[in-house]
Image (cartoon, rainbow, N blue to C red):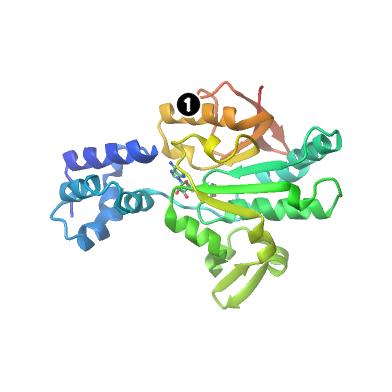
């Protein structure tokens, strides 16, 4: 079914208002494709009928299902590699120093758009390996909070079960042996120790992260701001700067930048990778 300009505008504005995801005019096909099954299962005559159905059901689960359908959940293990060397070689050693100096006794990490879990679990594996190699940061001092707006992603992430395609994207043979159990030819489960290190929670980046934690020491907010308008990004980075502890760290996607949207962060580099530190 084809979407009209008016229907596209109505749904586009509604989606942006609910979660910040901003669809340009050339994304009409995306709405047509991703909403086709709703149109069919709710027996709607057209997209405007579906729009009014969602509007009339705001307290039910239809709005959440619509947002879930409009999210892009592409992710992989140890995505881009650099963020994990930065974590291991710069960020965790700086936290270890702060603990040694008595300035810190807990480390709070937030994976702010965790999709199906590969990002927070890659963080957990890196933290666990780091903890094994020294005796200042203990694993139980590190809290990893992972959030996403998509219910289906959160459910999958919590299960920690991945098919062979997901497993072929970024996991080394050694990590596979060490951290996963093979259930069948096409299914692997992450071991319980790593699963227990991550707490998943539903969270809309439109809201104030203070409800999650008063302060995080490190935020991974990767490959999600690309879906938002500049205005939304400005608000988001400003909230991040407030929820980060003084001199806290921010890691964003390799194709993303805070330049032009926030003055709150200083750009740092390590071994060809980029990361940011809160100026205050
Ligand atoms: C492309 S994935 C990135 C996953 C991971 N950070 C990575 O880099 O591999 C983007 C994720 O952002 C989530 N997302 C989109 N809009 C959101 C919002 N307003 N609040 C929270 N999560 C959102 C989507 O559900 C999706 O799982």
Front-lying residue, 136 or 114? 136
Look at the image and tell me whether residue 74 can be seen: yes
Q: Nearer the viewer, residue 265 or 32?
A: 265
Q: Is residue 247 above or below residue 95?
A: above
In which quadrant of the rendered view does residue 40 lie?
A: bottom left
Q: Where in the figure is residue 190, as x and y percent of width and height? A: 63, 65
Vertical comparison of 63 with 170: above or below: above
- Rendering coords of residue 238 (x, y %): 53, 26
Q: Residue at x 55, y 35 (%)?
A: 210
Residue 86 shown left or right of residue 222 in the figure: right
Residue 51 left/right relative to 214: left
Is residue 123 found left or right of 239 in the rendered image? right
Label 1 sits on residue: 234
Question: Residue 232's image quarter?
Answer: top left
Q: Where does the C terminus fall, quadrant-wise?
A: top right
Say which residue appears at 80% left-offset and 32% top-offset: 103
Which quadrant, please, contains the N terminus? Answer: bottom left
Left or right: residue 16 compared with residue 279:
left
Picture quadrant of residue 104:
top right
- Residue at horizontal 28 percent and vertical 36 percent from the top: 13
Whether label 1 lies within 8 Å of ligand 1 gets the answer no
**Which of these two is toward me, 102 or 112?**
102
Q: Is residue 80 visible?
A: no
Give the secondary structure at mark 1.
helix
């Amino acid at each position: 079914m084809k979407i009209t300009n008016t229907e596209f505008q109505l749904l586009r504005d509604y989606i942006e208002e609910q979660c910040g995801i901003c669809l340009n005019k050339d994304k009409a096909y995306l709405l047509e494709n991703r909403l086709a099954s709703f149109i069919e299962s709710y027996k709607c005559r057209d997209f405007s009928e579906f729009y009014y159905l969602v509007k009339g059901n705001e307290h039910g689960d239809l709005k959440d299902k619509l947002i879930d359908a409009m999210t892009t959940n592409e992710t992989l293990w140890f995505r881009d590699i650099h963020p994990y060397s930065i974590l291991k070689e710069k960020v965790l050693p700086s936290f270890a120093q702060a603990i040694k100096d008595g300035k810190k006794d807990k480390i709070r990490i937030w994976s702010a758009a965790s999709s199906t879990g590969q990002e927070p679990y890659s963080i957990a594996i890196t933290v666990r390996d780091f903890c094994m190699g020294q005796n200042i940061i203990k694993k139980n001092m590190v809290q990893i909070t992972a959030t996403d707006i998509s219910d289906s992603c959160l459910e999958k992430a919590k299960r920690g079960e991945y098919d062979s395609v997901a497993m072929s994207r970024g996991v080394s043979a050694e990590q596979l042996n060490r951290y996963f159990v093979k259930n069948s030819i096409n299914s692997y489960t992450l071991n319980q120790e790593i699963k227990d290190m991550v707490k998943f929670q539903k969270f809309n980046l439109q809201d104030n992260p203070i409800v999650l934690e008063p302060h995080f020491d490190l935020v991974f907010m990767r490959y999600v701001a690309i879906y938002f308008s500049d205005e939304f990004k400005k608000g988001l980075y400003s909230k991040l700067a407030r929820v980060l502890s003084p001199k806290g760290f921010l890691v964003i996607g390799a194709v993303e930048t805070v330049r032009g949207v926030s003055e709150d962060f200083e750009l740092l580099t390590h071994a060809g990778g980029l990361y940011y530190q809160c100026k205050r």
